[in-house]
Amino acid sequence: NYWLVVLLASWLCSVSSTVSYDSKAITINGQRRILISGSIHYPRSSPEMWPDLIQKAKEGGLDVIQTYVFWNGHEPAPGKYYFEGNYDLVKFIKLVKQAGLYVHLRIGPYVCAEWNFGGFPVWLKYIPGINFRTNNGPFKAQMRRFTKMIVNMMKAERLFESQGGPIILSQIENEYGPVEYEIGEPGKAYTDWAAKMAVRLGTGVPWVMCKQDDAPDPIINTCNGFYCDYFSPNKAYKPKMWTEAWTGWFTEFGGAVPYRPAEDMAFSVARFIQKGGSFINYYMYHGGTNFGRTAGGPFIATSYDYDAPLDEYGLLRQPKWGHLKDLHRAIKLCESALVSGDPTVMQLGVHQEAHVFNYKSGGCAAFLANYDPKSFAKVAFRDMHYNLPPWSISILPDCKNTVYNTARVGAQIARKKMVPVPLRGGFSWQAYNEETASDADSSFTMVGLLEQINTTRDATDYLWYTTDIEIDPSEEFFRNGKSPILTILSAGHALHVFVNGQLSGSSYGSLEFPKLTFSQGVNMRAGINKIALLSIAVGLPNVGPHFETWNAGVLGPVTLNGLNEGRRDLSWQKWSYKIGLKGEALNLHSLSGSSSVEWVEGSLVAQRQPLTWYKTTFNAPAGNAPLALDMRSMGKGQIWINGQSIGRHWPAYKASGNCSVCNYSGTYDENKCRTNCGEASQRWYHVPRSWLNPTGNLLVVIEEWGGDPNAISLVRRETNSVCADIYEWQPTLMNYQMHASGKADKPLRPKVHLECDMGQKISAVKF
């Protein structure tokens, strides 16, 4: 009976937890909190990775895990729900709770997130009369239904903090402010409706709207960006919250790989906190992988690494992870002062200032800032002198001792490398040639050109457009050698052109310019010629207004120039359409499907052959190191492991841009610091360990352009070397805490801590 009483009392106590807010901070059980959060999107990693990711986030000093809810993953068809595998939202949230962390659930249901169609299921487009994200009855009905379903699911599992669960915040809509500004009054009416609808669901926790300056009460409007120190909420009684502090940027096919220096990331957070911020979320803390066809954009790469503190494979990105961990510890030392009241601001120089926060019990904490991006500054504060590197902030929990400076990195730097995994005999490939033109039962004929997404319903990336054209033997080009020019205008995103079964050329767009034009000479013969156009989507757009109007595919015109008649318009003749590839219909990526056709092998496997399926089997390598495929020898296509899609590969799309030397100081944007110029935007493709069997793993690749599968290799990601910088006057939390506790009576020497990944050991030290 005693234990029953104790357990019941504990349960009642947890149920009575309350989450609210005031002008300074989110309050939990009446206590103001400085909350450090990080985004980890559950579908972008495997469930087997979740516990380790969450634990590393906790060790990094996080209080909260933030995630979107991905509607198109959970309701792929109307009324057909999926909450299993890496879409097991409830399991993910319960794991966060087990780790002792909170959750910020961004229900949306629009998410953006560089995710296919912004998280919306494509079938929404085909509801009669629908207009997305505006004051539209059919859209609002669907949005209300899904949002209510998610909220009720969380309630049924008792996952809101008001029920004793970990969810302390929810979000409705996402980054709608610019859309509302563009469409005017219908947008404003929609914003008001969304806010009221969300509040009526009675979650017992606050709701936020990100990038929504006019968020109606009691919704908290929040900021996103590389810097948010300038931001103020729309009411004085709301806290200053930063729901997306961008730790880097996404990679696009054809673009260089962005990164953000740890020093600038720390500077932006410290600056936000010193100017009254109390909630900061790193977007992303772990970016992960766009498995399958989930990448949006279009042209978003399969890797969603984002230069996050935890890399795509779940390993610590050092020094960013460690430097931010030290920052969080320094901020927490000042927490009671930071939430007690507004700071006193003191000018220390032309570009230098101090923000001083008072503790209620007496004493103060200070943030000393040097905003000059080029010069060191020596400032006087409270009869002491402090050296401030350029573009940096020092944190003094007692207004005296510096425990942290954003530009002084004490965390170790870990250099990672991809190491080939020895496989007995290597990969032994078999090949199957995809048909380039077919009169299969699944094809149909229409007059004119059809929009791709309306035709495929996004069930596949691929749509065939096929037509015949008759060429008279008397055509002049047969004698003068000047091939006729085939010109094709497409709404995107990539196109392969086959004439009489032979590849005549390819064309593709980019994230900035997804539309494309193919225009080049083609080989024609006298009589009937078959033109087959393979139009390829590379993810659907994820941002902007009027989702229902977006299109892709060959919309024309399609013309043939250089004939005796001059220009022949093919746009309005009969076209045959086939949705998807034959290999997709045969499920060649699966174990059963791959056994249903004859494959060629050995010396008969052709290289550089377009539209070819390749398969092989391999055994899982020993160890726990993360794995990837090195696809640098291939062109473009998709990859499957044991029937599960790793995602799209496109190493042949080389990165353009400026990859000059990057300095941490000065304002950062997504174009400032980049790598891989002139190389593949993405060379390595993550293979989750949990997807592998001990033996007999099936690897299938569809190659569109033509590549050399014999050069594909399995690699493991591991730390090659670790190093660290240290200074005689390096600020250390350890020194400060030992002196404050009375455990040390004289200054301690600065120390460096170096460690390897699990399973590795330090083999040599160089100083």
Image (cartoon, rainbow, N blue to C red):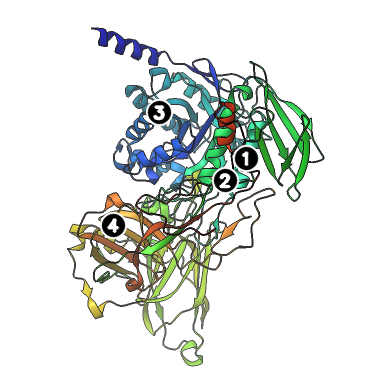
- Tell me the distance, in whole angstroms, between the alpha carbons under discs 3 and 2: 27 Å
The residue that label 2 is drawn on is: 410
Vertical arrangement, residue 569 with respect to residue 684, above or below: below
The residue that label 3 is drawn on is: 100
Residue 641 disc label: 4
Does residue 285 appear left or right of residue 633 in this picture?
A: right
Kindly check if marks 4 and 1 are in contact, taking CB atoms under 8 A apart as contact.
no
Residue at the location (49% across, 21% down)? 199
Residue 535 at what x, y percent from top left?
Answer: 42, 63
Classed neighbour count for the residue bearing mark 2: other residues with Cα under 10 Å, few (<14), some (14–19), many (≥20): many
Choose the circle earlier in sequence order: 2 or 4: 2
Kindly check if marks 1 and 2 are in contact, taking CB atoms under 8 A apart as contact.
yes
The residue that label 1 is drawn on is: 731
Does residue 406 appear left or right of residue 593 in this picture?
A: right
Residue at the location (29% across, 39% down)? 84
- Tell me the distance, in whole angstroms, between the alpha carbons under discs 4 and 3: 34 Å
Choose the circle earlier in sequence order: 1 or 2: 2
Classed neighbour count for the residue bearing mark 3: other residues with Cα under 10 Å, few (<14), some (14–19), many (≥20): some
Vertical arrangement, residue 701 with respect to residue 474, above or below: above
- Tell me the distance, in whole angstroms, between the alpha carbons under discs 1 and 3: 30 Å
